[in-house]
Image (cartoon, rainbow, N blue to C red):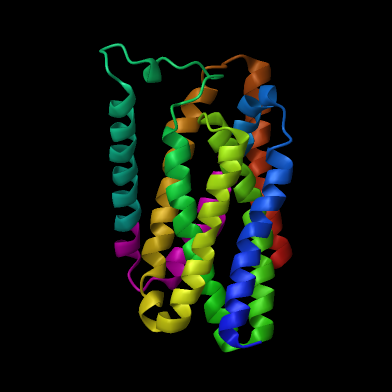
Amino acid sequence: MSVIAWIIVTSLMGGLLSVAAAAAFALNARTAHVPMLISYAVGALLGAVFLDILPHAFSMSGNPEHTAATILAGILLFFVLEKLVLWRHCHEEQCEAHEAQPTQHDHGRSGLMIMVGDTFHNFVDGILIAAAFMADVKLGLVTAIAIVAHEIPQEVGDFLVLLHSGYSKRAALLFNALSSLAMLVGGVLAYFALQSMQQSIPALLALAAASMLYVAVADLIPGLHRRPEINASIQQVGLICTGIATIWGVGALLH
């Protein structure tokens, strides 16, 4: 096959395979277990940000200060975006979105933002796959396999966030599948304009990190604090650490 054919096939299959593998786990989880598994999602998101995305963003950036500023701007952007979603659902002074219990959904706020960030991340993954294939087909295959393996635990977290945010299982699967197509778009565009695209990779990674960090810290962790009892707190800490360890373990195996 030609290089562009390899890029298209691996980007398309890689995105769909990672979503399918994550769905096999997340969609089989019992509804009653979703609030508990949100702790795992927090760990997976934080692990992806601090152990994978940000190190790549800073290592690829020639200007770390600019990358840090992009992260800061991204956090502010997602704060404003969440406000817009809240205003859409709040028509009275006492807004039910602010009074949601931990078992209730959040009117799609965190789900919307996690999809935006995941789309950026998948787009960058497509660029990386294309760059590897343009260097060597074997390197491209190894890179694609590594990306798919690394995406699975993060996609599990994304599914859980979508379910927590009020999306149905079918909608969560559909949105994740659509988001995965950004990997194909990134790969094809990178094939035709790799040099100019490379300059944008750190900024795209920074925006992806900002969205995941904001969702984990601003939307998911406050909900965990609504269960202050000692047993629940120990369980939450354990699951957060498990999520982080999953990301670290996959990264260690791939290296």
Does the segment drawn in magenta span residue 157?
no
Q: At x 67% / y 34%, what residue is drawn? A: 239
Across and down, in percent, residue 147 comes to 63, 65
Q: Nearer the viewer, residue 66 or 186?
A: 186
The reply to whether residue 202 is visible in this rendering is yes
The reply to whether residue 251 is visible in this rendering is no
Does the segment drawn in magenta span residue 53?
yes
- Left or right? Give the position of 95 relative to 254: left
The quadrant the N terminus occupies is bottom right
Across and down, in percent, residue 111 comes to 48, 38
The span picked out in magenta is 41-68
Q: At x 60% / y 81%, what residue is drawn? A: 5
Across and down, in percent, residue 58 comes to 43, 65
Residue 143's quadrant in the figure?
A: bottom right
Residue found at the far top of this picture: 94
Q: At x 29% / y 44%, what residue is drawn? A: 76
Q: Nearer the viewer, residue 135 or 87?
A: 87
